[in-house]
Each structure stands twice: as C-alpha cells, then as structure tokens.
Amino acid sequence: MNHHLRGLRQGHLALLLSLWLALAGCAGTGTQPIKTAADSPEPTWQPLLADAALHHVYEDGKTLVDMIPERPMPAILADYRALPCQPDCNTGEISAFMQQNFREPPTPDERLSEPENTPVVQHIRNLWPVLTRSPEDSRQGPLSTMVALPHRYVVPGGRFNEMFYWDSYFTMLGLAANDRYDLVRDMVANFAWLIDTYGFIPNGTRTYFLSRSQPPFFAAMVNLLAEHDGDEVYTRYLPQLEQEYEFWMRGADRLAPGQAGERVVRLPDGTLLNRYFGGENRPRPEAYAAEIETAAQSDRPAPVVYGNLRAAAESGWDFSSRWMADGEHLATLETRDILPVDLNSLMANLENTLAQAWQVAGNRERAAHYRDRVQVRQQALNTVFWSAQGFYSDYAWSRQAPTGRLTAATSFPLFLGLATPSHADGVAQAIQTRLLKPGGIVTTPRNTGEQWDAPNGWAPLQWAAIRGLRRYGHEALAERIARRWIDTNVSVYRRTGKLVEKYNVVSPGVGGGGEYDVVDGFGWTNGVLMQLLELYPQAAEGRRSQPAVMETSP
C-alpha cells in the first residue's frame, strides 16, 4: 500500500477513535471529559442565565458565561429556584447568588515590562509569551465553559482568553515572521484535534461556541505550515481537511436546484455554494440580553432573528450592514439569505488545498475531483458574485441577485488567486475610490455604529486586500494601503503603548462600536503588522515614549 494512503487510513482510524472516546466521555486532554454543545450555558444554566443576563449583573455578557460554577449546575439551579426572592429577584440578589456559587476564571499574568521606546516589532515579540497559553491553562475543570486543548495556543487578548478560529491564522502569520513555527505547529495540531473531536472547528474553544464555526481558514493554516515544513504536512492533515470540507458541504447531495441546506445552497442551475448558518435559533448566551432586545425590535419571529444573528457571528463580521436587509438596522439581519464572497473564496481555497494534498498522497483521481470543484466555484465567483457596479459583492440567493454592496470582502477572490485580471482591475478601482481612507481600508462605506462598518478597519481585511492587489500587479495601491495601516497602528502604539483589535481608519486612531469595549493585545493585529513590516521594512521604525512598565490586557 502506498505509504501516503496508509497514513491517511490511519488518520481516519484516529478520527473514529477520537469520536468514540468523545461519546464515551473520556477522551482527549488528560482526565477531563470532552465537552459538547449540550454543556453550554444555553441549556444548562436556565433560568439563571436569562435572569443574570437580563439584569445586567455583568457589564459584558461574556463575563457571565465564562464564570466557573463551584458545584454541579443542577444543585445550583435548585438553590436558585428556592431563593425567597423568587420569582422577582432583583439585580443585587442575583449578583449575590452568582458570587456565592461561581468563581472567576484564572487570570493569566498580564503585566508586560519593557524599556522605554521599545520598537513596535520588539513589542510584538515580547507579547507572544504574554498571549501564549499552555494546555494546563485551558483545563479549568469539568464545570467551566472552556474546552481543554492538547497543545499550546495564542489568544487574541483581553476578553478573548481562548483560542479563536479565524483570528488564529492571522496570528500565525506573525508567529511565522518571527520564526515561531513551534507555536504554529501546536496551533494547527489543536485545530486538527478540534476537527477530530467535534467534526468541525468551532468559533472558539468555549462550550457556547460549539454549535457554530467561523471563516474556514484551516486550509490556509496548513498551507502556511507546509511552506516551511514541506509536503508531509498535507498528508498529515488530509483527513482533517476532508472533514472540514464535509462539514461545510453537509447535505449538498440531497438538495434540489433552488434549495438550501445548513451551510450549502444549490442555485437553480445546480451550482453548489456556501453560506453561514450558525447553528441554533436562540440567543447566544454571551450576548443574551442584547439579542432578546434585537428580536423584540423585529417584526419577524424571534427564532428567525436569533438564527440570523448566529449566522452573522459565524461569519466573523458581527455585526455589519453587509447582513442587514435595510442596510441600517440589526433587527433586519438576513445573513442566512446571503452567499458571502469571502466564504466562497475560502471554500475554493479549501478545495485547492485538498487537490494539492491528494496529489501529494499519490491519488490523482481525487486531486482532479477537487480541481474540477475549484473551477466550478471560480466560475461562479466571476459571474454570480460580480456586481453591475464593477466589483465582487455577496449574492442574495433567495432573490437570485448580487447585493451590490461594496465591502472589504471584495478583495478575497484576489487574495486567494481566483479573480480574472479584468475583475481584479475593477476591484482595485473600487477599493481606491470608495474604501481607501487615511488610515487604511474601511470595512464598508456605511456607518451604522456596528463594529464591522465604517469608520473601522480590521487587520485581516487589510492583509487580504494588500496581498490580493500585489498578486494582480496593483503594487502601488497595495503599498499605499499598507503604509497607511502601518502608520495607524504605530501612531496608536506610540501614544498608548498598545496594539488594538480594530482601528478607526477615517480619522486614524482606536476603533469603536459594537457589543464591547475595544480590546488590546492583540493577536491578529500583531500578526499582520509583523508581516507588513517585513514586506515594507522602510515604512516604520515604530518607537514609542511610554513608562518602563505598562499594563496590557492579553
């Protein structure tokens, strides 16, 4: 038997074994049972979750669901239902009950000491250990919402103290630039473990994320590692690449033309494309109160609103006018009715990577199968997703028409090498005239108060645009975006000593909007900035004048 195929067969056996162990409740990372979506606070903390969220016991809803119960939830809930104040306990009474029955999760050391005027590149190198977590850090006990991982990982920062899916790819870019492939290997292995254990990669490593995913960057991670470690990376992770693909395409074989499954839609001509779905039709526990309020503002059934909110959270763009039927109000989200251009570009990249992996494994037939799928999807990207205005937009499959809305996602077919030269020229023109701002490219031209709209810019979207434009010969525009983004990052760093999650690119500075305060740390900002300073080393030295000891929130 070909040794590549033998390794693949062994990978499938390992997958079956891990799934069996998970069902038995004894697999994985030490002695702690594998947690599932059934362990999430949505089904297991009621009615306490709803009462604590709606009374705003914690300013940030995520703080609530990251708390660790001191004893099994059935006992806690029995005591809660027996409180004398029921059924009308006030905020103070609920808060006191939480303090008596829950503890805060462990807080890693957040203190970073640096000499004055530390260059930004050195600051990022200094941050990697601060943002790195060990397997022991993820083992917060069987009652916590944290999913235990077998290897080290890097967190984004601040309130995000777990491993997140698409954030991690852009973080890995910085680790690779700093020759920290030891951490890149560990993180790719963690994502493979998640696929083996759950059948997909969740949004993040918390039980309340186990019903939804995020933009599928696992193939890009495998490609990044293979560039350094060689082709054996493809055969090692081929079973997980296949499983990732099966997750996103689940149910496709049962769809008639014009029908939708969970994350897949078959167009009237038979073309298969993907959408975000998000899992259940109920409020996300980390945003429970806000989503109850949003549903109350809609004239649609609440479960429909909740499903579209979860789909938007799965997209990573939570939230944006991109998903709003009226382009202005969160209550009109129609995420499930939209085929996103970036998601379908990433799916083409996954198909390309599977073709490469099967080629390395010596199976030309399977490689050709995926190359054919890439061609079909690429054709759709350059027709279905091409707007009359001359750029890539999302496609409203229920209306059978492009949305015609320009967003920074327009660059993804360029980023992943799927555009034609003429289409790339149109995208470059749209970016230059409508998205380019003094601090980088804006996420959308609309300002709704949501964080994935104007005036914010985000590191992953700058990277996709810069790499895509360079790929198609628009070097000058790519460099202009890069320099403006670098200047924005470095100027905030000089002023505050921090790199943050998102930036205002219209009036360059710290970004805002959305459900929570701006977070510093910050994984994907660090990763993209490190890569850009390698591409454009003359752009910034990045020194600051700050106290010798500063506080950061990793």
Image (cartoon, helix red, strand yellow):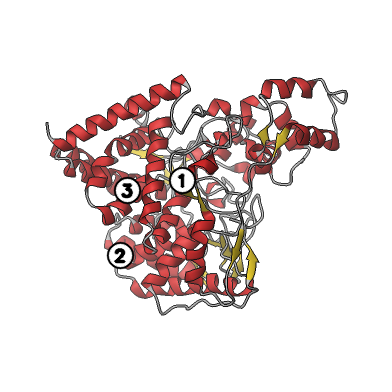
x%, y% of residue 542?
51, 76
Which residue appears at 47% of the width and 58% of the height?
A: 406
Q: Earlier in the sequence, mark 3 or mark 2?
A: 3
Say above or below: 175 vs 186. below
Left or right: 382, with 81 as reference point:
left
Label 1 sits on residue: 165
Residue closer to the observer: 328 or 140: 140
Question: Marks 3 and 2: which is nearer the front?
Answer: 3
Label 2 sits on residue: 471
CA–CA distance between discs 3 and 2? 20 Å
Q: Quadrant of the N terminus?
A: top left
Say above or below: 267 vs 377. above
Q: Earlier in the sequence, mark 3 or mark 1?
A: 1
Q: How many C-alpha atoms fall within 10 Å of the one at disc 2: few (<14), some, or many (≥20)?
A: some
Which residue appears at 33% of the width and 46% of the height?
A: 219
| Figure label count | 3
Is residue 82 in sight in this rendering?
Answer: yes
Left or right: 122, with 412 as reference point:
right
CA–CA distance between discs 3 and 1? 13 Å
Give the secondary structure at mark 2.
helix
Label 3 sits on residue: 222
Give the secondary structure at mark 3.
helix
Q: Amino acid at mark 1?
A: Tyr
Q: Picture quarter containing residue 288?
A: top right
Q: Amino acid at mark 2?
A: Arg
